[in-house]
Amino acid sequence: MTFKPVPAPVAAEVSLGDAFITTRVDAFINWGRRNSLWPFPFGTACCAIEFMGVVSSVFDLSRFGSELVRFSPRQADLLIVAGTVTYKQAPVLKRIYEQMPEPKWVISAGACATSGGFYDCYCTVPGIDEIIPVDIYIAGCPPRPEAFIEALVQLQAKIDGEAGKEQKVVGV
Amino acid sequence: MSAPHIDTPTIPSAAPGIPLAKDALLALVRERIEVEPDPSDRWDLTVVVASGRLRDLMRFLRDDPRLRMDVLLDIAGVDYLAFPGHRDARFAVVYLLKSLAFNHRIKVKVRVEEEALEIPSIHDCWKIADWMERECWDQLGIVFKGHPNLKRLLNHHQFVGHPLRKDYPCQKRQKLTVNDPMVDQLQLRLRQLGYTVLSEGEIHAPAVRGGTPGEVVGTGDKGMQDPDLTTGTQVGDMKRSVL
């Protein structure tokens, strides 16, 4: 009884030359995620006006891959809360966050969203992290567009460090 | 070279009359209704009226051809608790009126005792008074008798107390867990627009302005079945006529 020798598998790399790179799956997924963030602006006050400048041509947030501003939470993965949030609005914000598909990130833009700002009173939520988890906080009243851009760059660095394969699960 | 001639359009004068002086205004009001000038007033005339005569006074101010106070600028509630030197009733409600025809203003003040927090509503004299009175009740707890829908306007529906009262701790926060559905307000508005609201989920419209009632069905988000938000987000299928 004779056996045919099984030919050694030819590695795909050999035939492809240098037209490929190898990487980890995590790094590849994170590369895709961090460079195509689709923001949903939850704008309630003057910070939202500043955000308009950030996505317009002068500051041009799309240079960082975050160019498609969505107005449905179901199509977005980055929630930008820009402005004062009152207790009357709090269930709305929470609902919007819950409607966003995983993976998702939150930027709290400006003093009001971060801490309630100078509205230290009966009607204002002292920081949206009372309601939803926040990844990056931006200081300022309102923040300069550069601060928005830095927040996005920091968020991209944060996404880079995440385990991309595993679903990012946040308990709400 | 002379500048080209430009026709300046003449603006039709909306103010044929001249504003009355404070004392003339007061004399005019006193012809009909017993009022007292408020010693604390500034700039415009402020009169204090008994709550029983409030509606008569407001109608008189609005309709009298010499006064024609046709704009209700604002309704402000005041809490005089711990106000220096104040010995009158704890609360007051101030109505700010302005005449577009004569350009004069008047403030009408009604004192409200803490034990009897009730004054007549004037929602039928000015439409805007509806929301102004709701705000005043919401923030200070002053009841406007005869108001059709005296519910909170600024604060959420789970709020307890009245935050602009001086004895409310102003940093006491109250959380809201479920949104106010506000379906009653929606139905009220639809009725005002000529729709017939049959039930919460079904709204039929009559043929409006002689148009054929084409039916547009939709917008009930059937995906939102969470028990906590169902009433808040489901409006139901609306059938409305195409104008």
Image (tube, coloured by chain):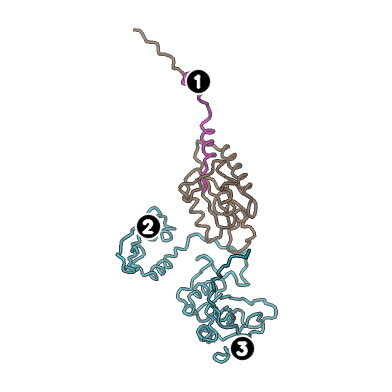
Chain colours: A brown, B cyan
| Residue B196 sits above or below residue A31 on the image | below
**How far across and how far down the image is residue A47, in percent?**
59, 54
The residue labelled by disc 3 is B24
Name which residue lies at 49% across and 46% down. A76
Q: Secondary structure at mark 1?
A: loop
The residue labelled by disc 2 is B220
Marks 1 and 3 sit apart, C-alpha to C-alpha, by: 99 Å
Magenta stretch contains residue B208: no
Give the residue at the far left of this rendering. B212
Of tags 2 and 1, the one toward the viewer is: 1
Residue density around tag 2, few if under 14, some if 14–19, many if 20 or more, within 10 Å: some
Marks 2 and 1 sit apart, C-alpha to C-alpha, by: 57 Å
Is label 2 in contact with label 1 (beta carbons under 8 Å)? no
- Residue type beneath disc 1: Gly
Pointer 3 indicates a residue of which chain?
B
| Residue B142 sits above or below residue B179 on the image | below
**Which quadrant of the view contains residue B34?**
bottom right
Of tags 2 and 3, the one toward the viewer is: 3
Name which residue lies at 40% across and 11% down. A5
- Residue type beneath disc 2: Gly
Q: Secondary structure at mark 3?
A: helix
Q: Which residues are magenta?
A: A12-39
The residue labelled by disc 1 is A17
Name which residue lies at 51% across and 68% down. B153
Is label 1 in contact with label 3 (beta carbons under 8 Å)? no
- Residue type beneath disc 3: Ala
Pointer 1 indicates a residue of which chain?
A
Badges 2 and 3, same chain: yes
